[in-house]
Image (spheres, rainbow, N blue to C red):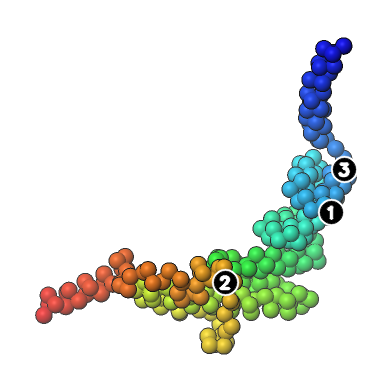
């Protein structure tokens, strides 16, 4: 009797393991409403990884389902709510390309710009994303001059232009410190918008735990360790030395 009990106890974990596997295997060839309900349930629980997986099943098995547009927008908004802005932008791109009507396209494009804008908590770290957000914002204003979102986009653009201005200014200062005057001049010259007055711009203040490493954009805590000398890789310095050498030889 004891021997039989031991056998049953030993077999039970295997039964549960294989039943679990079979349950996973059965998750295919379901109606579109099944996958849609799974997506909404997962989103309501905050499990966006599962929701994305169910969305892949819905899209793969029911490519023409009328539930797909709504599911796509649900996931776009859910990812934005959870601050996963790149994934939000991915779903908005899908929505715009495949499902949006002309009226719906405007709102989706606004949300896409908003996702890019909100993905920039630290403007010093992503120059390309600032440029992309500005380009898309300006394009939106030209495409939808009567849009209800026009002033919101305008406000975002003003802040993005200010961030871009400060970033270019800091890059220019960095090149000055590295003895690269041509690069410094380039970033000074491309600074946008004549309406921006440098002394009137309130710079972003980094939290103390980031300021230790990032500094204020002009120097850092480790500045004292950097030797006060010209950069050995400065092309401009080499060019100047060569020019002086030529002048001396001529003389």
Residue 44's disc number: 1
Residue 208's disc number: 2
Q: Say what secondary structure mark 1 lies in.
A: helix
Q: In the displayed structure, does residue 248 sit left or right of residue 167?
A: left
Q: Do the CB atoms of the residues marked 3 and 1 lie less than 8 Å apart?
A: no
Q: In the displayed structure, does residue 147 sit left or right of residue 212?
A: right
In the displayed structure, 199 sits above or below 80; it is below
Among the two numbered marks 3 and 2 on one chain, the one whose residue lies closer to the N terminus = 3
Q: Is residue 86 visible?
A: yes
Q: In the displayed structure, does residue 131 sit left or right of residue 146?
A: left
Extreme-front residue of the structure: 2
- Dot 1: few (<14), some (14–19), or many (≥20) neighbours within 10 Å? few
In the displayed structure, 227 sits above or below 43; it is below
Among the two numbered marks 3 and 1 on one chain, the one whose residue lies closer to the N terminus = 3
For the residues marked 2 and 1, what is the alpha-carbon distance in whole angstroms?
36 Å
Badge 3 is on which residue?
34
Q: Which of pointers 3 and 2 indicates the residue nearer the eye?
A: 2
């Amino acid at each position: 009797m004891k021997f039989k009990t031991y056998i049953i106890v030993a077999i039970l974990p295997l039964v549960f393991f294989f039943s679990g596997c079979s349950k996973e295997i059965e998750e295919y060839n379901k109606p579109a409403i099944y996958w849609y309900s799974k997506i909404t349930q997962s989103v309501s629980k905050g499990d966006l990884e599962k929701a994305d997986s169910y969305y892949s099943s819905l899209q793969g098995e029911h490519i023409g389902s009328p539930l797909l547009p709504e599911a796509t927008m649900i996931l776009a908004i859910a990812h934005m709510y959870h601050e996963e802005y790149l994934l939000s932008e991915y779903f908005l791109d899908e929505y715009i390309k495949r499902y949006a009507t002309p009226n719906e396209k405007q709102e989706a494009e606004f949300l896409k710009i908003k996702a890019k804008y909100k993905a920039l908590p630290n403007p010093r770290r992503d120059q390309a994303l600032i440029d992309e957000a500005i380009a898309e914002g300006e394009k939106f204003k030209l495409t939808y001059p009567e849009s209800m979102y026009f002033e919101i986009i305008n406000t975002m653009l003003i802040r993005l232009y200010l961030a871009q201005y400060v970033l270019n200014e800091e890059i220019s200062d960095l090149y000055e410190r590295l003895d690269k005057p041509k690069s410094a001049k380039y970033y000074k010259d491309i600074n946008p918008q004549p309406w921006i007055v440098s002394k009137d711009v309130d710079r972003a203040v980094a939290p103390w735990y980031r300021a230790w490493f990032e500094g204020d954009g002009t120097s850092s805590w480790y500045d004292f360790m950097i030797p006060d000398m010209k950069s050995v890789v400065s092309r401009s310095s080499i060019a100047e030395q060569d020019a002086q050498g030529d002048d001396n030889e001529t003389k």
